[in-house]
Every structure is written in C-alpha cells, then in structure tokens.
C-alpha cells in the first residue's frame, strides 16, 4: 500500500458551488496508483463538499437556491450572530451536507459517474479561500 497527501486551495466568490473535479483528477492521475481510495476533507465549518451533476448548471443553481430557502439568514432564534447574519445559516448548511467525501480510484482514475463532479459548497456570502485536504491510499 502507498499513500499520498496534498491540499487544494479553492477561491470561492460567495455562496454557491465551485467545481474542483479536474484539479483533483489531475492530482490523482499524477500519483500513478492503479486502485485505491481518495478521501477529501474540507477544513472549514461554513462550507462543505458534495458530488453533484456537472452537466446542467440549473442543478447547481437550484441546489444553492433551495438551501437558501431551507436555512434563512437573520433568523431571530439564532444566538451565534457575531460573524454576521449569514454565518449561523452557513454552519447549519454545512452540518446538513458533507465535510468529507471518499471516492474509489479504479485503473488510475476516480470512479465518478458520467455526470458527476466534485464541488466545494460555499455557504457564506463573501468570497473565501477554502482548503480541501486530500489523502490517497492504494497501490
């Protein structure tokens, strides 16, 4: 068994989904593993990771809109408000989604479906620089 680790810097432009599939795929391919498992972990509590369709941009827009309706800003019941009205909703959205993904590597490539892409899901309004840690285990 071999291991490889790295991290990716992802610049977001505010709320939304930002695809990182190509960058991760290039790194996985460069490791020259035949089979394995890549684990991705976002090092933040107000952003998350997701695997979603990358063919129709309406999917991404609808997801972002739906999460905005699900957890609204300025809820008077929130106690954590020091970092702005979008911070506590961002924490809740991150708790409802994933901070870690595991993707099989088969024949040297991530085994994603035809229309699947890996996204950083930014839950804050302002641009941020997010860090995604990656760990590849295999042979």
Image (cartoon, helix red, strand yellow):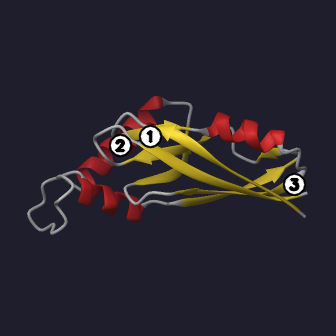
Circle on res. 35 = 3
Q: Do the numbered discs 2 and 1 sit on residues whose CB atoms are within 8 Å?
A: yes
Q: Quadrant of residue 103?
A: bottom right
- Marked residue nearer the N-terminal end (2 or 3): 3
Q: Which residue is mark 1?
A: 17
**38 vs 81, nearest the viewer:** 81
101 relative to 78, above or below: above
Whole-percent x, y for residue 4 in the image = 78, 54
- Marked residue nearer the N-terminal end (2 or 1): 1
Q: Quadrant of residue 52?
A: top right
| Mark 1 closeness class: few <14, some 14–19, many ≥20 residues within 10 Å | many
| Mark 2 closeness class: few <14, some 14–19, many ≥20 residues within 10 Å | some
Q: Residue at x 84, y 50 (%)?
A: 106
In the displayed structure, does residue 122 sit left or right of residue 26? left
**32 vs 66, nearest the viewer:** 32
Residue 51 makes an appearance in the image? yes
In the displayed structure, does residue 138 sit left or right of residue 38? right
136 relative to 30, above or below: below
Whole-percent x, y for residue 14 in the image = 34, 38
Q: Which residue is mark 2?
A: 64
Whole-percent x, y for residue 74 in the image = 12, 54
Q: Residue at x 51, y 52 (%)?
A: 49
- Mark 2 secondary-structure assignment: helix
- Mark 3 secondary-structure assignment: strand
Circle on res. 90 = none
**40 vs 96, nearest the viewer:** 40
- Which of label 2 and label 1 is nearer to you? 1
Q: Residue at x 50, y 30 (%)?
A: 56
């Amino acid at each position: 068994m071999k291991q490889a680790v790295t991290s990716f810097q992802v610049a977001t432009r505010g709320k939304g989904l930002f695809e990182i599939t190509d960058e991760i795929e290039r790194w996985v391919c460069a490791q020259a593993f035949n089979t394995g498992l890549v684990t991705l972990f976002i090092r933040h509590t107000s952003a998350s990771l997701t695997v979603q369709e990358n063919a129709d941009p309406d999917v991404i827009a609808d997801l972002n809109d739906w999460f905005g309706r699900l957890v609204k800003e300025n809820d008077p019941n929130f106690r954590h408000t020091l970092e702005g009205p979008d911070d506590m909703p961002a924490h809740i959205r991150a708790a409802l989604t994933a901070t870690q993904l595991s993707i099989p590597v088969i024949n040297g490539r991530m085994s994603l479906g035809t229309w699947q892409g890996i996204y950083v899901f930014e839950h804050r309004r302002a641009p941020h620089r997010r860090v995604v840690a990656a760990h590849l285990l295999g042979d």
